[in-house]
Image: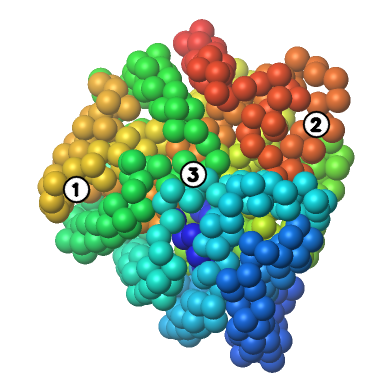
Amino acid sequence: MNLGPISRPARPARDTARDDPAGDGGGGELGALPEWDLSDLYPAMDSPELTGDLERTEAECKAFAGRYEGKLAGLGGDGLATAIAQYEAIDLTLGRVMSFAGLLYYQNTADPLRAKFMGDSQGRITAITQPLVFFTLELNRIDDAVLAAALASSAALRRYRPWLDRLRVLRPHQLSDELEKFLHDQSVVGATAWNRLFDETMAGLTFEVAGEGAGADQPMGLEATLNLLSDPDRKRRQAGGEALAAVLEANLKLFTRITNTLIKEKEVEDTWRKMPSPEHGRHLANDVEPEVVDALRQAVQAAGPRLSHRYYAMKAKWLGLERLEYWDRNAPLPETDDRVVPWAEARATVLEAYAGFSPRMAELAEPFFERGWIDAEVKPGKAPGAFSHPTVSDVHPYVMLNYLGKTRDVMTLAHELGHGVHQRLAAGQGELLSRTPLTLAETASVFGEMLTFRKLLAAETGPAKRKSLLAGKTEDMINTVVRQIAFYEFERRIHAERREGELTSARLGEIWLAVQGESLGPAVNLGAGYETFWAYIPHFIHSPFYVYAYAFGDGLVNALYAVYEQGEAGFQDKYFDMLAAGGAKHHKELLAPFGLDASDPAFWDKGLSLIEGFIDELEAMG
């Protein structure tokens, strides 16, 4: 948690909900793949525009502190609104710098110049914003009655009320100004440095995959090797799984050290802040009640036997196996369409699916393809996975993919464009209010993915291909809901046990196997080597307890989609209003127009029943 400084992570929010992302390569079959044009942020790392923004903002931060420090309580409503607006403008400028630095870096993490630029930018902005640490701390010290009077007197201040409310729930966990300034200054050599070490280590790993035609001719990167786990050839899947296990094992000492250090650092700060649990800070940041998350976790865990356990037992039979090995879990069915989907076809598929819901949704997504807002090709040094980074509210989001032309890659494109549409709509709220809590950030992405899946399914008439499509979607939903809650449970256990002392690599592996066994069920054999697979999940390093947001978002969207399918009058307008609210409304307010309430324990059963219905349908297909 960061109460004082303006916070803008250099690492964009990353989607690995499927946890076995697409792989390496590309080629002529895909057609021309788009690449980012980052000039909407800055022309270059050494551009006068960027240098000038940093110099100007450094002076503005000092002037801001001189103007307001120690005086906030006496400003009145309009005066406070003016101060927040000035703070927001500073945030926007520095957010632009860090977005540019982060996107450049993740486009090629192996480039030392980009890595240095990102590190230097983080250090420079940490120093520049040191005078601003007082601001949110002092806002939180304003008496409730004084702030209430200020809000009553100023419409301009009332606009910022949702941001103030989220800020003030942190008051019980706020430290002294001196300690907050210390945490701000040392952040660049704390978690940020360990995060960067993890990223650069992962980007530099190479995997020797055994077997003819499985990549034995040259080392493969992480993406390519993970991609083998969904290869139709079982020998290639096994070779990929064993290569992953071997390299992760060889680097396990480092990953264990990074994990132990970051958990301990978090424990120290949580203790000082009097956090009741390791995950409490994430709940506050997500503007969600702990009991709502607990209800989600318990509902998913209770549903395991009738969802993932049942599905994987069926899949083993489909593949003619007694049990699935861990490298079989994401294997395609024999009927799966393994043709390469060219980029132009993927674009048309997603835009048509969006337009089928509303022409406005397709119009919002179109510029991503036309204006250099997508980076799709797999390249050496490029970060794995996929994300949509919102940058700042006066520019636009950028989407990163590692596109290989699989049906799953088309779904990932639909997912990330959903994020992009959401971020474009929410930008109208301004820099402080456009930031959607993680629990709601998946709303448009999962919805867009569902629209695309339904379009693909409707176009497929062959029973075998329909079964394959439905199985693929079911697996994605299991990975997004059941598996991410298992990741969350893993984090809960290791953070609790770390408080008793350091965790060895072996103990981390034991906890990982225990949780995954509970989640996946007896039909999946978690054989030798799989105990290391916790080590490559970036969320554990960058964003502790982030992962439950995927399950929250999927459950929420499943419930929303059921309302849409029922023909709810005015659904599209309500949906766009919800996305445009950004972070200005609580989840209760956002869902009320649809007759939904995430605090109702029965709410989560609605989303889980959709997955169960898909499994019922697959079972009926035989």
Q: Label 1: few (<14), some or many (≥20) within 10 Å?
A: few
Disc 3 to disc 1: CB gap under 8 Å? no
Of label 2 and label 1, which has the lower sequence position? Answer: 1
**Residue under the point 68% across and 28% down:** 591
**Residue under the point 77% across and 33% down:** 575
Mark 2 sits on what residue? 574
Q: Position of residue 90 (x, y in %)?
A: 67, 73
Q: Which mark is residue 499?
A: 1
Mark 2 or 1, which is nearer the eye? 1
Q: Position of residue 7 (x, y in %)?
A: 54, 65
Quick check: can you spot residue 348?
Answer: no
Q: Position of residue 2 (x, y in %)?
A: 47, 60
Say above or below: 519 vs 34: above
The amino acid at mark 3 is Leu
Q: Which mark is residue 284?
A: 3
The amino acid at mark 2 is Lys
In the rendered structure, the answer to whether residue 517 lies left or right of residue 179 reads left
